[in-house]
Image (cartoon, rainbow, N blue to C red):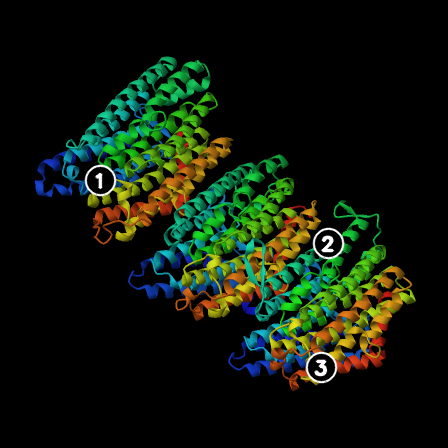
Amino acid sequence: MQANTLAILPEISLAVLAALLILIDLRLKPERKALLPGITAAGLLAVLALTLAFARPGAAPESIWGGMLRHDTAAFVFRLIFLFGAAVTCLFTIGWKQVERRGEFFVLLVLSTLGMTLMAAAGDLIMLFLAIETASIPLYVMAGFMTADEKSTESGFKYLLFGALTSSVMVYGFSLLYGFAGTTDLYALAAAVASGDLPPLGLLGALVLVLAGFGFKVAVVPFHFWAPDVYEGAPTPVTAFLSTASKSAGFAVVVRFLLAVFPAAVLPQIIGVAALMSVLSMTLGNSAALAQRNIKRLLAYSSIAHAGYILMGVAAASLLGAASVVYYLAVYLVTNLAAFGVVIIYFNVVGSDEIKDYAGLSRRHPGLAFALLVALLSLAGVPPLGGFFAKILVFAAAVEAGLIWLAVAGVLNAILGLYYYLMVLKVVYLDRGPDEDKPLPVRRAHMAALVVCLLLVLALGTVLGPMYDWSNLAAGGLF
Amino acid sequence: MNQTIWLTLILFSPAVAAAVIALLPRENKALARWAAFAASLIPLALTLLVWFAFDAAPVAEAGYKFVERRVWYAAIGSAYHLGVDGLSLTMVLLTTLLTPLAILASFSVEEKVNAYMALFLFLETGMLGVFLSLDLLLFFVFWEIGLVPMYFLINQWGSEKGERELWGGMKVSARTYASFKFMIYTMAGSLGLLLAIQLLGVVNQTFDLPSIVAQWNSLSNSDTLLGGWASVGAVKTWAFWAFVIAFAIKVPVWPFHTWLPDAHTEAPTAGSMILAGVLLKLGAYGFLRFVLPLYPEQSNQYAGVLAGLATMAIIFGAFAAYGQKDFKRLVAYSSVNHMGFVVLGIAAAARAAGTLDANVALNGAVLQMFNHGLSAAGMFFLVGVIYERLHTRDLDAYGGFFPKVPVYGGILIFTSMASLGLPGLNGFISEFLVVRGSWPIFTFWTALSMLGLLFTGAYILKGIAKTLHGPENHEAAHHLTEINTRELWVIAPLMALMLWLGVLPGWLLGVINNAMQALFG
Amino acid sequence: MQFLQFLQEWPLLSIVTFLPGVAGLLILLIPATRRDTTHKAALAAGGTVFAVSLLVYLAFQPGGPRYQFEEYFAWLPQLGISYHVAVDGITAPLVLLTGIVMFTGVIISQRIEERPREFFAFLFILATGVFGVFVSLDMFALFYFYEIAVFPMYLLISIWGWKQTREYAAMKLTLYLFIGSVISLVGGLAMYFASGLGTFDMLALEGANFSPQFQILWFPFVFIGFAVLGGMFPFHNWSPDGHVAAPTAVSMFHAGVLMKLGAFAALRVGIMLLPEGAKFHLPWIIFLTLVNVVYGAYIAMVQTDFKYVIGFSSVSHMGLVVMGFASLTPDGYIGAGVQMVSHGIMTALFFAVVGMIYDQAHTREIAKLGGMAQKMPFVAFAFTIGGLVSMGMPGLSGFIAEFPIFMGVWQSDKPWIAIVAAISIVITAAYIMRLMRRVFYGEFPAEFEGHVHDVSRSEKVALGLLAFVLILIGIFPGVMVPMVESGVEHIFVLLGGL
């Protein structure tokens, strides 16, 4: 019992943190409410520390709480990822006028994070559904948080509609699975699938329905339509959170579901489906990104493309594949947070997300320009940054699985990606802007968050060992 | 093996001097001139030392003396391998003799004196290298290297007048045109040589000349080479023609001679002296040193073609010379004519190697090389003397100069006669030997070339007549001054040698004959 | 000698690899107002790197073990990734080449006025990548450094390049090279998995015994992917545009060193790890190189822009390097190895000269230039040396390099290719002489009077150093060839003798 409680220590502490935040929000004088983001971030980091200290899984994965949750390294690593993402997001909300003084926003953020940690650990269909909804519903609200802003409202509403639709499809898929197997426990389900007694076609159908739900969360083609509008309309910190933590949570479920429950040995079609989705996501995401003029939309499409790369690891359906997914997500999280960090900082001062308004940034604030350079290059997959090794891992996984064509498609897409990242950098470094001489103040908290993210990007690209070990353990724990 | 360093000293002392002179202060022209002249005497002195020690020196290998062999480009089997026999020593002597004279003749150069002198000395190293190398690759290195200074000498210090129209109506100065043509012609010609040398290197796994001569000739014609691509016979034939064309351009043999009149005409006086005096000999030397020993069969087979071309060169060279209005061009074409005899002698030797006739022809050819070196250098120098004073080379602008410049006139007549082949002067001996040797071998071609000899007389007399005799051209004569002391010092040694060799050729012929006996006997 | 042997114990390769990158980042920290300090710091760093690379070269013993200065650090042993560096007889000269070109490039860049800190930082990061590729014995590390070397080029060209084409050229170059490298990468990963050894260490992979089918399938990916950077036809198109648009030091670095990176990686990963594939494919690839050599020279001849002439000449000369590889004969490889160094230095010299002239005359139109030798005689001299090297003039390094390449081709199964390729020598002679005549001699245009002066002393030192190396190798091939030869011997152990 003791161990079981410790295993859900992160969730418990997140719930406590949420409750505390409500209280603090009530007690805090209005003029001091600007402290809220900092407090939340500190709280989340404290949870992160707690998790690191006390919630480490054992060598062998175990099912706890009657099979509701899985206590394994995968869940552990993903929790760390979400918590880190949430904490950095909080820091970036500092200075975001409509958000930074609103206690409920941070409560929602913490609750959503709670939902995500449960998603990563869920070992049961019911638990999984609940976790997904716990994570999603606060996000719908957060996306539409700036009620005065039409785009934000539209964004929240759109997100809700798409989310509700795909959730219902997904839950239908869950019910079918239950109908075939007679159990809601994922690993019991896996055993049933592995026995081969279930009708393959039916399983495949159910799986496709389920994938619709997951696909929505991770924004892969063809479930990506919401992403650009929502990303653009939502408050940028929320966009950052959506594109990093929320996406990671979706992938946490996808790898567990596709690798542990439906091994390719039983349903070889899965590989085809995943590979197809991967190629479509990469290609569509990258080609659409080429035409973007707004940096948030560009990052939205790039995030679709990156979902495609990550799916490549999934399609490999191997230990290396799963490990590459984890590694990629970790890299992607810190990198994209850094990129959005720059976007947020710049928006706070300049008030624009148009790429052309980034002209002259390198003269106005060389440090910030360099941060964007590092982030975008990591996204493009240039060493010595994390993105390079992450890409190598997914390509390696694809090659190992014999999906050479997929690897080649990925490689070609990497070039497309490089092109539009370079186009942004060109504006930043080459074009002259009208306000080059004006100062560009950057808050200390922002700078700190940015530096931490960038150092992690660099570390993930140079000191490969620790994160790779974790990814590998996490991948091993799935099975 | 006992290594000596005499040849290395001869070879590189001019190059070292060139580097030093290039670094001398630019303002002091006299210093550069005298330094260059003094430096050019060093290889001459060393050559004379070697010359007098030659008979006594031991034969090191394959008939060569003073052999040196050092590691150079071991990876592909090439070494720094030098040596001399009578043939190369004669040529080395010619080179080291003409260079100081040419430098003395260029004291009138006023522009960029340091660079000029440095290039000149560098050119000497290039020419000496060709004669001294016993390694095909090393030979090629020097063969090509000589082009560079010559190119710049023509391009930078050539005659300043004249324009040539290129395709497209673009006009360039004549010296640019001539230097470019010289370079491209010779390089294109060398291309085949380069490829053939590579081929020889690949087949023999070495570039060492004596070893290649031994190995190469022991290959059976029916063997295949190059991974079965070709038979030995075919490869030898290709390589033969590649060598022949490269050397024929250099000599030049008709119809490869068209670069020569341009280059000679536009070059500065000393440049023309060296061009005609030494550079043309490189081609003939190539025939003797490489073509005949390496391809005896092919040489024999195609000797008739060579003889025919040589005769054409003799006849057309003479005709063309006669038709010139430009004094320098006239002398330039005379080179084509005279070198024709050298090639005729070589062709005869190729056809009938080992016979007495062939030996006579060869002796004549080598002697003719030396003699032509003297007389052509002298002629070009004398043309230069007038040109410096009148700034025109047009024969129609000359006339009746004899009374005004009797000393010069006398020298010009003397040198022209040597060139013409007047008995008692050097040209006669060598041409006689060539004709005597070739007659039994190529009777028809030799007879035809005698006809050419007739025209030789015609154009030489035309040159003399147009310059010295006839009605005086007042305007030109007004500017004309007598030949000065420095110029006399240039021409005097040449005249002395012409006379000496005309009367007592034995000292030189002995050396040449020994070498020919060793090479082709 | 004692001292040099003692050096073998030092981590010289790590120093030479990371020193530029670290120096570059430190330069970024110099306050923007202190330009002078920036330039001096860059010069000091460049000089140090050159000195270290020279030490590596001098201390390398051709008769010694195959790999020297070996360093090993298990980077990610789980995947068999290591930081394993060493030099052999082929890479030691290339390390020296990089040191020389970097040093002279920094000297030439002393005129950079715009954002010098960033310029040197990016240039030095690039240098780290280049050194890394040359010394890596681990395939992963090789790719890692390779991409580090490719990327900074984009910014260097697009920010400091020639205004008219820089954006286009920079993007074209980056995309071409990136495509090439990632395609090779897929091949590299395939090798990693197919070997079953679980290591990226190329020494281990050399003994992996890939099946002939595998090698034949993958060789083209790996080889051509890298050869893109080597400027191989028909993927050479980025190179002249890139070279022309780049600022002087970057052109020097790019044509001088980076193109060698492509050729070298194609050799190291392509030919040495997939020898059977090489034997199968190179016999047709040699045709592509022939096009490179002859067509490149022809295109160079018809250019009207000084810098484009040089740009295309690089395509032509790099074709000879790959032709040497494709000949599959030891002579060809020796020549290619020397040619990489010779061409690197020669083309660096060319671009330096072009930069000096353009800086002062503000035009590169050959027709508008003239008589430069009057104002800058030393530059004319240096260019002449470079030009003669380019023509393959004996006595200079170009001859030493190209001669064995041709010999190698004679020994290959298509000897006639040597004859066709030789045409390029005459074409090269034609365009080089045209350049010399039109740019340096002839009439000095009156409009340049007053603003065209001689170059500074330090620039003369740079040119002199480059020209000196060209002459030194040409006269004494022994200073480099035995080293390259020792490296080639090992390649032919892998290629199965021949």
Q: Amino acid at mark 2?
A: Leu
Which residue corresponds to mark 1? A90
Of helix, strand and loop, which one carries label 2? helix
Q: Which residue is mark 2?
A: B199
The one nearer the camera, B109 or A209, is B109
* Viewer-proximal residue among B196 and A208: B196
Residue at left 76%, top 83%?
B496
Give the chain of mark 1: A
State whether residue A198 is above or below residue C456: above
**Which label sits in the foreground, 2 or 1?**
2
Q: Quadrant of residue B514?
A: bottom right
Q: Is residue A263 left or right of residue B225?
A: left
Q: CA distance from mark 2 to mark 1?
A: 76 Å
Residue A334, quarter of the rendered image: top left
- How packed mark 3 is, by other alpha carbons closer than 10 Å (few <14, some 14-19, many 20 or more), is many
- Specify whether disc 2 shares its chain with disc 1: no
Residue C411's disc number: none
- Secondary structure under tag 1 reads helix
**Between residues C120 and A115, which one lies in front from this camera angle?**
C120
Q: Position of residue A48 (x, y in %)?
A: 27, 39
Residue at horizontal 20 percent and vertical 40 percent from the top:
A93
Quarter of the picture containing the N terminus of chain C is: bottom right
